[in-house]
Amino acid sequence: MPDPQKPAQTTANTETPAAKAAPQAAPKPDPTDDVVGKVYDGRLMRRLLTYLRPYKPQVAISAVATILKAASDSVGPLLMMIAVDTYMAGAPPDQLSWLPRHLALLMGHPVRPMLGVTLIAAIYLGCLLFTFLLELLQTYLMQWTGQKVMFDLRSQIFRHLQFQDVAFFDRHPVGRLVTRLTSDVDALNEMFTSGVLAIFEDVFTLTFIVAIMLWKSWPLALLTLAVIPCILFVTRIFRAKVRDSYRRQRAATARINSFTQEYVSGMSIVQLFNRERRAFSDFSAVNSENKRAWTDAIFAYAWYYPVVEFLSSTAIALILWRGGEAVLHNAAFLAAHPAIQRIPGIFGTVEIGVLIGFIQYAQRFFRPIQDLSEKYNILQAAMAASERVFKLLDTHAAIVSPAHPIPGNGSGSIEFRNVWFTYDPRAASNNVERTTDNSFLPDPNLEWILRGVSFTVSPGETAAIVGHTGAGKTTIISLMMRFYDIQHGQILVDGTDIRDQDLTQLRRRFGVVLQDPFLFTGTIADNIRLGSSWITDQALEKAAEEVNVADFIRSLPLQFAQPVQERGATLSTGQKQLISFARALAHAPAILILDEATSSVDTDTEHRVRLALARMITGRTSVLIAHRLSTVQSADTILVMHKGQLRERGTHQQLLAQRGLYYKLYQLQYRDQELRDPALATPASDAVPSTV
């Protein structure tokens, strides 16, 4: 039975029960969820760009396509100016611009107005087609690159999570880890596909537009730019509002993921205790935070874009007003309308085509500005997401294999030497100074789960660990496999300190069957193998035969290929337990650990499991945590734990004769079992008379 003193495991620990007690309130915010992030952080950006290194050719082609597309987009209004002022207004031959002169040279004669307009329209159409092809190329390559980067980054994060120690998952809710793997990586993908290069495209587009406007009429260009301070002021307010909304939205999304994962995992308990209304109320509170955050962001967009549109329309009106006046002062226009008196102004004179082109450029000028505001939010979200992702990736596992591992002797022995342990993160492990003497002074402010525990399990011996709930039984098993590091003492497996052994090789020595069996989505064969390809079909079937589950598996339509749903939802607890037995046996462990492994099976199944256990423990060191008298009584040695201390040790009969803690447990727990099952009763010659 798991120790209640141990921090609650999340479902990232594969042996965590699916149905646990319903939580009492919505998950507390994690400070990392509220990371806002700078708009641009050079350190983070340099690290993000390293993920683009394998795809340099694609990124380079996309960058070139972006520049060419920005230039091609800016040509349209210029062609319109040329068509109007050269061919429609009838410009003299000596006043032709570069393109009409070269068209005339190409044709070998002056270009007639109709032909000139047709040629300019064809060039315009060619630019549009060229822009389309460039956008197609850029979009495809960057989306392809973004997906590749997402794949690489998600693989790195998942691989990193696999090597974290169990204590890491005690501190980090699964929902938040899922958010790092999904939403945060999506934010980075949006930056790669729609952020960085799109920002460069907008900047180049603005640069080309401003350069052409200044070239054609710098007074009108400055008039167009006169509304920029107002737009920058409005954009600053918009960014502040949206920044806060997005921060709250990301934090709320992480809490929703964490909350949903927790409640769905414990749904059976929620329904059993009729907590649906309370659960829905708690979820509604978290969901409302997300809705309010999105509502605020939507409101910010609702007023920002109309304001920018109004300011851009104001700029166009100014251009039409002052530019129209400049057109009226044009010499050609005055010649055609002699009644109009020329009045020189600050804007001088411009052709009608220039005015039309300026209106088009003004319309195109403010679109990139709006896009830059959107890209600002994308870039900021990506910086915040990258900070959270890199913080996760920079979290080094506290428990790792040594640089130069020392293999054990393969004997299967287990030894604890004056072991002190607590789950409290304030306590440091003794990886450097591995003392086992009694000079250790435990911190009285910490809750110690194990207090100076020492015992030895000889090779091939079967040891049972008993004690009240919270005595430290399951903790002992976790420490054997080095899921946690101890604060004082030494644990030896196969005659070697487990901190000197390679973690993979150490854990490969163990076969574990826990109280709450865990099955993965896949087939029954997949759940027995667990990816160990060296387990043949014959070995798999033999393991199922030895634990008496083969008949049940063969009764299924697809037998060993029968699909298993998430957590084995279609199987009974007893059936999942037997498959867990087959899994442990198929891996041929040298040390077998059973943690209340028969607590979830009926009497008939237990009888079959008991026969299988007799075969499984033969030739193996076995550690059993059980309250069933049959299992405890047959053990070579019994360890009695009480409040984190090893209080008694001996065989069943020796401990009964001592009339200590085990004797009291026997009277309270096991006597009833013997009365219900006389076959388990202690022989009369060996029985200890009760004095209770």
Image (cartoon, helix red, strand yellow):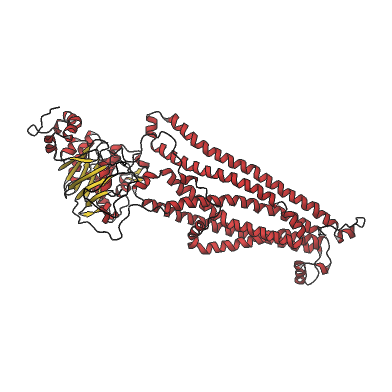
User: Can you name the residue that lies furthest to the top here?
Assistant: 692
Q: Is residue 87 visible?
A: yes
Residue nearer the viewer, 2 or 566: 2
Rendered-image quadrant of the C terminus: top left
Task: Examine the rendered structure and indicate whether residue 491 appears above or below residue 634.
Answer: below
Could you tell me residue 332's position as x and y percent? 86, 61
Relative horizontal placement of residue 199, taking residue 667 as reference (left or right)? right
Could you tell me residue 685's position as x and y percent? 7, 33
Rendered-image quadrant of the N terminus: top left
Q: Is residue 128 visible?
A: no
Relative horizontal placement of residue 673, taking residue 136 as reference (left or right)? left
Could you tell me residue 259's position as x and y percent? 44, 38
Residue nearer the viewer, 471 or 458: 471
Q: Residue at x 13, y 32 (%)?
A: 681
Q: Residue at x 67, y 58 (%)?
A: 206
Could you tell me residue 352's position as x and y percent? 81, 57
Q: Quadrant of residue 120?
A: bottom right
Q: Residue at x 56, y 52 (%)?
A: 39
Task: Examine the rendered structure and indicate whether residue 270 appears above or below residue 436.
Answer: above
Relative horizontal placement of residue 96, taking residue 58 as reference (left or right)? right
Residue nearer the viewer, 551 or 653: 653
Total marks shown come to: 0
User: Can you name the residue that lies furthest to the right here?
Assistant: 339
Residue nearer the viewer, 264 or 309: 309
Task: Examine the rendered structure and indicate whether residue 684 appears above or below residue 56.
Answer: above
